[in-house]
Amino acid sequence: MAKKNKVWTLKDFEKEVQHLDPNTTPEEPAFKTGVLLLSALHVGANINRLTKFTGYPKDFVRDRVKRCRENGIFVGGEVVCGWFDENGGIAFWMDVLVADGLLAKRKTAVVAGV
């Protein structure tokens, strides 16, 4: 019998963000942004699909998608990330900070205080 592919849910992504940082809570913007970025791997880097999947306010999603596009995290409908490399956890949280507008990527460097 063929093995079924896992169907990812919002709760799965919330658990993963909680696993990546047990100190973060669902009320924090960074938690929601982390869920949003992981969800984009599943539904694509599309404002409407992300809004529908997460249930987050469209303005919240739109702002983060815009910053991800401006900084090369989202290219077209795809997510460009190094989250699964050796230092993937660090790369993930750096991209969360970029999506939240606290950092910006410039070519290969990350610039703080933007």
Image: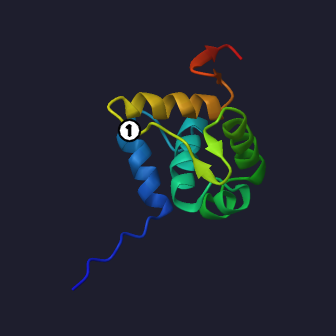
Disc 1 is placed on an element classified as helix
Say which residue appears at 39% left-offset and 33% top-offset: 89
- Residue occupied by mark 1: 20
Q: Quadrant of residue 6?
A: bottom left
Say which residue appears at 70% left-offset and 48% top-offset: 61
> x, y percentage for residue 79?
57, 47
Q: Nearer the viewer, residue 83 or 19?
A: 83
Residue most extreme to the bottom? 1
Is 93 drawn above or below residue 62 in the view shown? above
Q: Is residue 70 left or right of residue 3?
A: right
Residue most extreme to the left? 1
Q: How is the image coloured?
A: rainbow
Q: Nearer the viewer, residue 4 or 8?
A: 4
- Position of the N terminus by quadrant: bottom left
> x, y percentage for residue 99?
64, 35
Q: Quadrant of residue 72?
A: top right
- Amino acid type assigned to the residue bearing label 1 in the image: Leu
Residue most extreme to the right? 59
Say which residue appears at 63% left-offset and 22% top-offset: 107
Question: How many badges with numbers are in the image?
Answer: 1
> x, y percentage for residue 90?
42, 28
